[in-house]
Structures are given as structure tokens and as C-alpha cells.
């Protein structure tokens, strides 16, 4: 499990598009005994998702606003920590809408799974789910809460980064390490502090920031941060 997780971290950091992110996540899900994965970000009524669920189910889910009655989403809001679930436990209690949701979920191969909820900034909620068509899949022992949250945040920022790159010239696209240093600089961290946080040398941090300044045409780090924010390259603070 440790090797698979380490490999996933490396693949996510190197990913340059959503297709590669999905491929890495699908491989990791299967190594854990699950068939599919789904990342969902909810901010008010707005939903963003990246998943390997069947396309017909994705269309049904989004068009019917099923996130409002999805028991997994409801439980994620209540628990705030990694949890396992199974559609067999969803009792409709006379609600035809919930019954239709449960039956359609099972029909499309989403019967049991594990979900990792994380609260983001400005009321944003994020959740990562690994799902299977089986009645039950045992959660790998090594998949602890700390590592799970780390994974959700990596996917969140990686998807945001590859999405942001579509707005700039390919020659201006920042490398994963340049983005790491830029994000910490945007948070007000010094070069020395960033070096300690990222686990690289002081001069290496400065090198990455200099490269980023050159790519975005900034004369200083504050200007670099301002340009990056203007282009939507940075996550909300």
C-alpha cells in the first residue's frame, strides 16, 4: 500500500492534464480493491466533479441534482472524517426519489465504497470516493485519515493547476515544484520557511521562484503572486 500511495503521489505531481490524473486515480483505486473513483467539489449549488463513474450515471446524477439527497454527501457533511458506506443500508422510508436514486446507483455499479470528506475555504466542501459494484470491500488498513486528507487536497490542487494552465501560453506553464513554491510565497512564507516546508534547499526554492518570475514576466515575487492570482493559477486563500 505504501508503494502504491507513493507512486500515486509521484504520478499526480507529474500530471499535466485531467486524463492523466484520472488514469493515476483509477489505478490506485483498483489497487485498493475498488473499481472507480469520484472527486466532487460542492460550493453552494455549484458542483464540479472528476470521476470514472459511468457517463450515463454522471449525467443522471447532475441533471437530477442528486447531490441534495445522496446519502453519501449527507453523511460526509455530518461525519467530517473518512467512512465506509453501502447502498444496501439506504432505507427509502417511503421516498420514491431516494428509492430511485439507490436503485439507479446499484444498477450503474455504485454499490459500496469509502468516502473522504474535506472542508475547503469559503463554504466549499470536497469529497473523494472510491466505489465498487460489490456489496462490501474491506478498507485497506494502511489507508489512514491523515493520508486520505492529503490525497484529497492533492487532487483538488492538481485539478485546479491543470485547469489553470489552459489560460496561459504552454511556455509559461509552471512546473509542479514551481507551483509549490509560488503557493507558499502567496501565503506569505519566506524562502527559508518554504524550503523547510517543501523539503528542498533554500537556493532551490529561489531558483524555482526565479524560473516562475521569468515565465510570467514578473520582476519580483509579490508581482509574481499578483499575476498568478489574476490568471487564476492559485487556490483561494
Image (cartoon, rainbow, N blue to C red):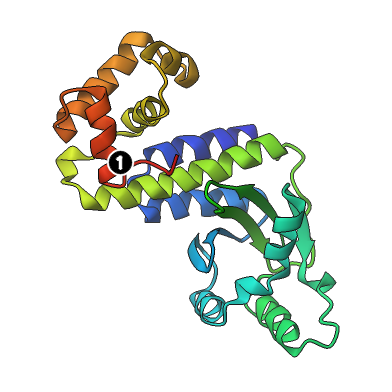
Residue 174 can be seen, yes or no: no
Label 1: which residue?
229
At a point 65% along the width and 57% down the height, the residue shown is 34
> For this view, does 215 lie left or right of residue 25?
left
| Secondary element at image label 1 | helix
At a point 34% along the width and 29% down the height, the residue shown is 182
Residue 79: percent from the left, percent from the top? 76, 52
At a point 54% along the width and 61% down the height, the residue shown is 42
Residue 161 can be seen, yes or no: yes
Q: Tag 1: Cα neighbours inside 10 Å, few (<14), some, or many (≥20)?
A: some
- Quadrant of the snapshot with the C terminus: top left
Residue 37: percent from the left, percent from the top? 58, 58
> For this view, does 174 lie left or right of residue 20?
left
Residue 177: percent from the left, percent from the top? 35, 28
Give the camera-side residue of 119 and 32: 119
Q: In the figure, residue 96 lies in which quadrant? A: bottom right
Measured along the vertical axis of the image, is residue 123 above or below residue 157?
Answer: below
- Quadrant of the snapshot with the N terminus: top right
Amino acid at each position: 500500500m505504501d508503494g502504491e500511495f507513493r507512486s500515486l503521489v509521484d504520478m499526480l505531481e507529474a500530471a499535466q492534464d485531467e486524463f492523466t490524473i484520472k488514469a493515476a486515480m483509477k489505478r490506485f483505486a483498483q489497487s485498493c480493491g475498488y473499481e472507480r473513483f469520484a472527486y466532487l467539489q460542492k460550493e453552494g449549488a455549484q458542483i464540479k466533479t472528476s470521476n470514472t463513474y459511468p457517463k450515463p450515471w454522471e449525467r443522471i446524477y447532475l441533471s437530477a441534482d442528486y447531490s441534495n439527497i445522496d446519502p453519501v454527501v449527507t453523511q460526509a457533511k455530518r461525519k467530517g472524517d473518512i467512512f465506509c458506506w453501502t447502498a444496501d443500508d439506504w432505507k427509502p422510508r417511503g421516498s420514491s426519489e431516494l428509492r430511485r436514486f439507490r436503485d439507479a446507483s446499484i444498477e450503474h455499479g455504485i454499490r459500496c465504497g469509502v468516502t473522504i470528506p474535506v472542508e475547503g475555504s469559503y463554504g466549499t466542501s470536497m469529497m473523494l470516493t472510491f466505489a465498487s459494484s460489490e456489496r462490501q470491500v474491506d478498507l485497506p488498513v494502511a489507508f489512514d485519515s491523515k493520508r486520505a486528507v492529503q490525497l484529497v487536497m492533492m487532487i483538488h490542487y492538481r485539478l485546479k493547476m491543470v485547469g489553470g494552465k489552459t489560460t496561459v501560453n504552454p511556455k509559461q506553464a509552471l512546473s509542479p515544484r514551481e507551483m509549490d513554491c509560488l503557493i507558499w510565497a502567496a501565503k506569505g512564507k519566506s524562502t527559508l520557511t518554504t524550503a523547510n516546508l517543501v523539503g528542498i534547499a533554500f537556493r532551490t526554492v529561489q531558483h524555482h521562484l526565479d524560473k516562475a518570475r521569468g515565465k510570467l514576466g514578473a520582476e519580483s515575487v509579490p508581482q509574481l503572486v499578483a499575476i498568478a492570482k489574476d490568471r487564476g493559477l492559485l487556490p483561494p486563500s
